[in-house]
Protein backbone atom coordinates (compact mmCIF):
# COMPACT_ATOMS: atom_id res chain seq x y z
CA UNK A 1 0.00 0.00 0.00
CA UNK A 2 1.34 3.41 -0.98
CA UNK A 3 1.31 5.89 1.89
CA UNK A 4 -0.46 9.24 1.49
CA UNK A 5 1.83 11.84 3.02
CA UNK A 6 -0.70 14.67 2.85
CA UNK A 7 -4.46 14.47 2.26
CA UNK A 8 -6.31 17.70 1.46
CA UNK A 9 -10.09 17.54 1.27
CA UNK A 10 -12.27 20.30 -0.17
CA UNK A 11 -15.46 20.83 -2.19
CA UNK A 12 -13.67 19.76 -5.37
CA UNK A 13 -15.28 17.05 -7.53
CA UNK A 14 -12.19 15.10 -8.63
CA UNK A 15 -9.11 13.51 -7.06
CA UNK A 16 -5.67 14.94 -7.77
CA UNK A 17 -2.47 12.99 -7.12
CA UNK A 18 0.81 14.86 -6.84
CA UNK A 19 4.30 13.67 -5.94
CA UNK A 20 6.38 16.57 -4.66
CA UNK A 21 10.16 16.93 -4.17
CA UNK A 22 11.31 14.48 -1.54
CA UNK A 23 9.04 11.81 -3.02
CA UNK A 24 6.00 12.64 -0.89
CA UNK A 25 2.50 11.91 -2.17
CA UNK A 26 -0.05 14.72 -1.84
CA UNK A 27 -3.69 13.85 -2.53
CA UNK A 28 -6.46 16.41 -3.06
CA UNK A 29 -9.92 14.90 -2.86
CA UNK A 30 -13.64 15.65 -2.39
CA UNK A 31 -14.87 15.96 1.21
CA UNK A 32 -17.13 12.90 0.99
CA UNK A 33 -14.69 10.45 -0.59
CA UNK A 34 -14.26 7.12 1.22
CA UNK A 35 -10.99 5.43 2.10
CA UNK A 36 -11.96 2.54 -0.17
CA UNK A 37 -12.36 4.93 -3.12
CA UNK A 38 -9.01 6.58 -2.33
CA UNK A 39 -7.23 3.23 -2.08
CA UNK A 40 -8.74 2.16 -5.41
CA UNK A 41 -7.56 5.34 -7.18
CA UNK A 42 -4.06 5.08 -5.70
CA UNK A 43 -3.81 1.42 -6.70
CA UNK A 44 -4.91 2.31 -10.23
CA UNK A 45 -2.12 4.90 -10.51
CA UNK A 46 0.48 3.04 -8.42
CA UNK A 47 2.93 2.56 -11.29
CA UNK A 48 2.98 6.31 -12.04
CA UNK A 49 3.21 7.21 -8.33
CA UNK A 50 6.15 4.89 -7.67
CA UNK A 51 7.98 6.15 -10.76
CA UNK A 52 7.54 9.78 -9.64
CA UNK A 53 8.59 8.92 -6.09
CA UNK A 54 11.81 7.37 -7.38
CA UNK A 55 12.50 10.41 -9.58
CA UNK A 56 11.86 12.99 -6.87
CA UNK A 57 12.98 11.21 -3.70
CA UNK A 58 16.35 13.00 -3.66
CA UNK A 59 15.08 16.31 -5.03
CA UNK A 60 14.74 19.07 -2.45
CA UNK A 61 14.06 22.75 -3.04
CA UNK A 62 15.89 24.87 -0.46
CA UNK A 63 13.74 27.48 1.27
CA UNK A 64 14.52 31.02 0.23
CA UNK A 65 16.37 33.19 2.73
CA UNK A 66 15.92 36.37 0.65
CA UNK A 67 19.58 37.16 0.99
CA UNK A 68 21.79 38.85 -1.56
CA UNK A 69 23.07 36.50 -4.24
CA UNK A 70 20.07 34.17 -4.24
CA UNK A 71 18.47 33.28 -7.56
CA UNK A 72 14.85 34.09 -8.38
CA UNK A 73 12.95 32.83 -11.42
CA UNK A 74 10.96 35.27 -13.53
CA UNK A 75 9.45 34.24 -16.88
CA UNK A 76 11.80 31.26 -17.03
CA UNK A 77 15.02 33.17 -16.37
CA UNK A 78 17.05 33.32 -13.17
CA UNK A 79 17.80 36.73 -11.67
CA UNK A 80 20.24 37.40 -8.84
CA UNK A 81 18.89 39.29 -5.83
CA UNK A 82 20.86 42.43 -5.03
CA UNK A 83 20.17 45.13 -2.45
CA UNK A 84 20.84 48.43 -4.14
CA UNK A 85 19.38 51.95 -3.96
CA UNK A 86 16.50 52.04 -6.46
CA UNK A 87 13.51 54.24 -7.06
CA UNK A 88 10.68 52.54 -5.19
CA UNK A 89 11.00 49.12 -3.62
CA UNK A 90 12.03 46.78 -6.43
CA UNK A 91 13.30 46.85 -10.01
CA UNK A 92 13.92 44.00 -12.43
CA UNK A 93 16.87 44.68 -14.70
CA UNK A 94 19.90 42.51 -15.35
CA UNK A 95 19.36 41.47 -11.71
CA UNK A 96 16.51 41.70 -9.21
CA UNK A 97 17.20 44.88 -7.26
CA UNK A 98 15.54 45.68 -3.93
CA UNK A 99 15.98 48.90 -2.01
CA UNK A 100 18.11 48.17 1.10
CA UNK A 101 15.48 49.96 3.19
CA UNK A 102 13.11 47.10 2.29
CA UNK A 103 15.56 44.33 3.15
CA UNK A 104 13.59 43.31 6.25
CA UNK A 105 10.47 42.74 4.15
CA UNK A 106 12.19 41.40 1.01
CA UNK A 107 9.85 38.39 0.80
CA UNK A 108 6.75 40.59 0.89
CA UNK A 109 8.22 42.96 -1.70
CA UNK A 110 9.06 40.12 -4.11
CA UNK A 111 5.68 38.38 -3.71
CA UNK A 112 3.83 41.66 -4.32
CA UNK A 113 6.00 42.29 -7.39
CA UNK A 114 5.31 38.79 -8.73
CA UNK A 115 1.57 39.19 -8.10
CA UNK A 116 1.49 42.50 -9.96
CA UNK A 117 3.44 41.17 -12.93
CA UNK A 118 1.42 37.94 -13.01
CA UNK A 119 -1.77 39.98 -13.24
CA UNK A 120 -0.36 42.06 -16.10
CA UNK A 121 1.14 39.18 -18.10
CA UNK A 122 -1.59 36.58 -17.57
CA UNK A 123 -4.42 39.02 -18.29
CA UNK A 124 -2.73 40.00 -21.55
CA UNK A 125 -2.29 36.36 -22.58
CA UNK A 126 -5.88 35.46 -21.66
CA UNK A 127 -7.28 38.31 -23.75
CA UNK A 128 -4.92 37.44 -26.59
CA UNK A 129 -6.04 33.81 -26.83
CA UNK A 130 -9.69 34.51 -25.98
CA UNK A 131 -9.94 36.87 -28.95
CA UNK A 132 -7.85 34.63 -31.21
CA UNK A 133 -9.90 31.49 -30.54
CA UNK A 134 -13.29 33.04 -29.81
CA UNK A 135 -13.76 32.34 -26.10
CA UNK A 136 -15.81 34.44 -23.69
CA UNK A 137 -15.02 34.47 -19.97
CA UNK A 138 -16.45 36.27 -16.98
CA UNK A 139 -13.42 37.33 -14.91
CA UNK A 140 -9.73 36.72 -14.25
CA UNK A 141 -8.40 36.28 -10.72
CA UNK A 142 -4.82 35.84 -9.55
CA UNK A 143 -4.59 33.39 -6.64
CA UNK A 144 -1.97 32.15 -4.18
CA UNK A 145 -2.39 28.49 -5.18
CA UNK A 146 0.87 26.57 -4.87
CA UNK A 147 0.24 23.68 -7.24
CA UNK A 148 -3.04 24.37 -9.02
CA UNK A 149 -1.74 26.59 -11.78
CA UNK A 150 -5.15 27.43 -13.16
CA UNK A 151 -8.83 26.66 -12.81
CA UNK A 152 -12.12 27.52 -14.48
CA UNK A 153 -15.44 27.83 -12.64
CA UNK A 154 -18.84 26.93 -14.03
CA UNK A 155 -19.61 30.65 -14.10
CA UNK A 156 -16.75 31.31 -16.49
CA UNK A 157 -14.32 32.73 -13.94
CA UNK A 158 -10.67 32.00 -14.68
CA UNK A 159 -8.17 31.64 -11.83
CA UNK A 160 -4.38 31.55 -12.14
CA UNK A 161 -1.62 31.22 -9.55
CA UNK A 162 0.77 34.16 -9.37
CA UNK A 163 3.58 31.59 -9.22
CA UNK A 164 3.11 31.03 -12.95
CA UNK A 165 5.03 34.28 -13.53
CA UNK A 166 8.17 32.27 -12.75
CA UNK A 167 7.56 29.97 -15.74
CA UNK A 168 8.55 30.70 -19.37
CA UNK A 169 5.85 32.53 -21.31
CA UNK A 170 5.10 29.52 -23.52
CA UNK A 171 4.22 27.54 -20.37
CA UNK A 172 1.95 30.34 -19.18
CA UNK A 173 0.31 30.25 -22.60
CA UNK A 174 -0.36 26.53 -22.22
CA UNK A 175 -2.09 27.02 -18.86
CA UNK A 176 -4.13 29.88 -20.29
CA UNK A 177 -5.30 27.86 -23.31
CA UNK A 178 -5.99 24.86 -21.05
CA UNK A 179 -8.35 26.92 -18.89
CA UNK A 180 -10.00 28.65 -21.85
CA UNK A 181 -10.92 25.25 -23.30
CA UNK A 182 -12.48 24.37 -19.92
CA UNK A 183 -14.96 27.18 -20.51
CA UNK A 184 -16.67 24.85 -22.98
CA UNK A 185 -15.45 21.40 -21.93
CA UNK A 186 -15.54 20.93 -18.14
CA UNK A 187 -13.55 17.70 -17.96
CA UNK A 188 -10.28 16.13 -19.11
CA UNK A 189 -11.83 13.79 -21.65
CA UNK A 190 -10.29 12.92 -25.00
CA UNK A 191 -12.53 15.58 -26.54
CA UNK A 192 -10.95 18.15 -24.21
CA UNK A 193 -7.35 17.20 -25.03
CA UNK A 194 -8.14 17.01 -28.74
CA UNK A 195 -9.40 20.58 -28.57
CA UNK A 196 -6.31 21.75 -26.67
CA UNK A 197 -4.16 20.02 -29.29
CA UNK A 198 -6.09 21.71 -32.08
CA UNK A 199 -5.42 25.16 -30.58
CA UNK A 200 -1.88 24.39 -29.39
CA UNK A 201 -0.33 21.44 -31.31
CA UNK A 202 2.76 21.26 -29.06
CA UNK A 203 0.79 21.42 -25.80
CA UNK A 204 2.09 17.99 -24.72
CA UNK A 205 5.71 19.14 -24.43
CA UNK A 206 4.60 22.25 -22.53
CA UNK A 207 2.49 20.16 -20.17
CA UNK A 208 5.43 17.82 -19.57
CA UNK A 209 7.71 20.78 -18.80
CA UNK A 210 5.25 21.90 -16.14
CA UNK A 211 4.98 18.41 -14.68
CA UNK A 212 8.76 18.05 -14.48
CA UNK A 213 9.64 21.58 -13.39
CA UNK A 214 6.55 22.79 -11.54
CA UNK A 215 8.26 22.30 -8.18
CA UNK A 216 10.69 25.10 -9.13
CA UNK A 217 7.86 27.64 -9.34
CA UNK A 218 7.81 28.51 -5.68
CA UNK A 219 9.52 30.76 -3.18
Image (spheres, rainbow, N blue to C red):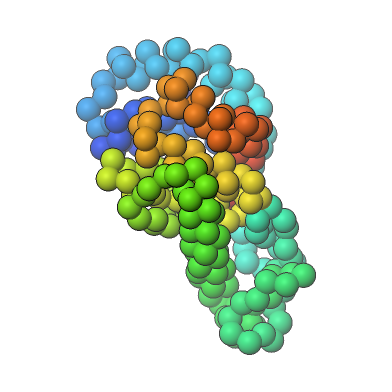
Measured from the top left, where is residue 32 in percent x and y? Answer: 22, 27
Please state which of residues 58 and 179 is positioned toward the viewer in this rendering.
Answer: 179
Picture quarter with the C terminus: bottom right
Q: Residue furthest right?
A: 94
User: Which residue does the image show at 32% across and 46% down from the upper left?
Assistant: 156
Measured from the top left, where is residue 128 in percent x and y? Answer: 53, 53
Relative side of 139 to 3, left or right: left
Q: Is residue 59 visible?
A: yes
Please state which of residues 20 and 184 is positioned toward the viewer in this rendering.
Answer: 184
Q: Residue furthest left?
A: 32
Q: Is residue 212 visible?
A: no
Measured from the top left, where is residue 65 in percent x and y? Answer: 62, 63
The image quadrant of residue 179 is top left
Above or below for 109 versus 150:
below
User: Which residue does the image show at 57% across and 46% down from the upper left?
Assistant: 173
Picture quarter with the N terminus: top left
Please state which of residues 138 and 61 is positioned toward the viewer in this rendering.
Answer: 138
User: Which residue does the image show at 45% across and 33% down from the upper left?
Assistant: 26
User: Which residue does the image show at 74% across and 65% down from the upper left?
Assistant: 80
Please state which of residues 132 and 38 is positioned toward the viewer in this rendering.
Answer: 132
The image quadrant of residue 140 is bottom left
Above or below for 19 versus 127:
above
Relative side of 24 to 187, left or right: right
Relative side of 93 to 34, left or right: right
Total numbered labels: 0
Measured from the top left, where is residue 10 in percent x and y? Answer: 28, 38
Amino acid sequence: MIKIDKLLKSNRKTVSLQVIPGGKLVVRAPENITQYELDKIIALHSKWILKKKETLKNVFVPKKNYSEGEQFLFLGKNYTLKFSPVAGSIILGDNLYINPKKKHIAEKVIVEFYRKKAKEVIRERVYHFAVKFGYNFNSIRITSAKKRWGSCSYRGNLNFSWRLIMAPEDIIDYVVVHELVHLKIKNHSKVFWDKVGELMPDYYSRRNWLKKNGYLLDL
